[in-house]
Image (cartoon, coloured by chain):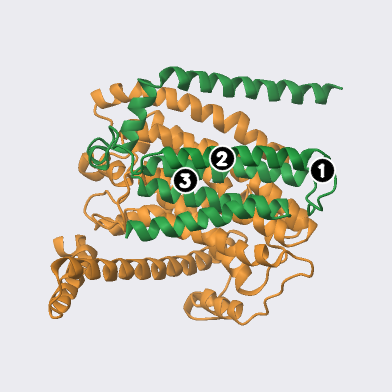
Amino acid sequence: MDLLNNLFVNLYDWLAGALHALAAGLNLVKDAENAIVAAVMSLVVIVVLLLWLVLMVLVLIWLERKNAARIQDRVGPNRVGPFGLLQPVADTIKMFIKEDIVPTNADRLVHTLAPIVVAAPAVLAFAVIPWGKGMFPVDLNIGVLWVVAVGSIGTIGIFMAGYGSNNKYSLLGGMRAVAQMVSYEVPQVLTIVAIVLMTGSLSLNKIVDAQSGWGGMQWYIFAFPVGPIAFIVYYLSALAEVNRTPFDIPEGESEIVAGHHTEYSGMKWGLFYVGEYFNFFLVCTIAVTLFFGGWQGPLLPPYVWFLIKVYALILLGMWIRMTWPRFRVDQLMGFAWKTLVPIALVNIILAALATPILKAIGLI
Amino acid sequence: MDLIVFYLFATLAVIAALGVVALRNPVHAALCLAVVFISLAALYVLLSAPFVAAAQVMIYAGAILILFVFVIMLLSPGVDQGAGALKWQRPLAAVFGLALAVELILVLASAVLPAARGQYTPERLAQIGDVQAIGALLFTDFLLPFEITSLLLLVAMVGVIVLAKKRVRS
């Protein structure tokens, strides 16, 4: 059991030890040896994390299509591989060999950079997530802020795509997306403030540690009433932040073709697609870390608990996507500013007042 | 290592800042401004102030820049041809630019580099935490400016709402 719980931490330690043994053969100064090992190990972590994220996106795409099919009484992908599991792989290969089209009179440089600016920050944000006990790429003491700050760079990328494509639908979609993402970032950050107030730290590791009571079940979602309110507001604004139905007006097909990525093809379009799933996965991991105790949980290994919770939230998001119609533009902005922001603000005051009481009765 | 990172981002910031001034397309200038903000954030991290860095990216690159871009788009973006400039604008700019350059040279010539170390050394910050240090300062030494700033922002917000409401009624 102990072996399984610390599987990846032990693997990391073993690899670092092996590298130290290898580097010792070079007879370097101790500092140089440590620096080399640290550099190689961080490279290993980066590569493993990237591969893991790509794998997760492939799984998410397959899951989304299968779920959509099931809810809409269809079969879904079932030709490539067992249960259509290899369909996303086939789609990726197709994406790579497609022609890359840049429209005439488009702003070439901005058009090319946009998909990168959208997808790269989403990957950066994963650097601070605690995936399991002792499994975090870096421990920043401003972890939560890092995720929010890096996420706000993606907005610029979407604007670049809208502007650089020289297409009115792209521009409209880009403007809609930017307005929506800036608006929904406000309630999202405000709900995080409530959790930070209860923990007294911005570090994601400390937030997870603070939820370790009751045999790993003392999650903030149970800290009534602050936790549940914060979670609902966070989850709704997070769905809007990643432009998923019912908040997908930036790319509403029936209104503006495909919004900001109308003029993209091949792997550039693929980057937008992947970036969207990176972001969706990211907001679910953050929600799990903040409200559902991260990797905390009884019996099962920490990283298994983490994945179970993340996929539960992902399935919830997919369910919402498949069953709700799209918002209207004016309703959407009204919902952010007139409903979510006031609730989140009241929740902060509530958190400040309730934290001592909750601590006294042992709920947090 | 720190030095390499510093020179990398300092160069990037200066080049992007030149782009902000020199590029004729206002959208390109705004995007260069984003690069400046993000490079400055990296420099803040080097100064062991990660909180300020995150706030810099979040507020300047994430919100203020987006507002700039919005205004640019609402005013219909076009490449600036230099038309519409006022006649006395260039001579005036030269005078002000010269004054600023003289000021800058004087300050740089008289400043002692490196300056004396302040109260918040990296070691002390690592001990108390940079977020905690900023919070404590904001609510003790800088309480009055902090409150006045929030009042100022509130007034600006109320002003905007009043102006916007009037237009709807007429």
* Crowdedness near tag 2: few (<14), some (14–19) or many (≥20) residues, C-alpha within 10 Å: few
Question: For the C terminus of chain A, which image quadrant?
Answer: top left
> Disc 2 or 1, which lies upstream in sequence?
1
> Which color was chain A given?
orange
Answer whether labels 3 and 2 touch (C-beta < 8 Å): no
Q: Amino acid at mark 3?
A: Val
Question: For the N terminus of chain A, which image quadrant?
Answer: bottom left
Instruction: State the CA–CA distance, disc 2 to disc 1.
Output: 26 Å
Q: Secondary structure at mark 1?
A: loop
Q: Nearer the viewer, residue B68 or A282?
A: B68
Instruction: State the CA–CA distance, disc 3 to disc 2.
Output: 41 Å
* Crowdedness near tag 1: few (<14), some (14–19) or many (≥20) residues, C-alpha within 10 Å: few
Q: Nearer the viewer, residue A331 or A264?
A: A264
Q: Amino acid at mark 1?
A: Ala
Quadrant position of residue A96: bottom right
Q: Which residue is mark 1?
A: B85
Q: Which residue is mark 2?
A: B102
Is A211 placed above or below A317 here? Answer: above
Of marks 3 and 2, the one in the foreground: 2
The label number, if any, that marks residue A144 in the structure image: none
* Crowdedness near tag 3: few (<14), some (14–19) or many (≥20) residues, C-alpha within 10 Å: many
The answer to whether one can see residue B85 in this image is yes
Chain ID at mark 3: A
Q: Which residue is mark 3?
A: A148
Q: Is residue A66 left or right of residue A196?
A: right
Instruction: State the CA–CA distance, disc 3 to disc 1.
Output: 40 Å
Q: Amino acid at mark 2?
A: Val
Give a yes or no on whether discs 3 and 1 share a subunit.
Answer: no
> Which color was chain B given?
green
What residue is at 32 percent from the left and 60 percent from the top?
B1
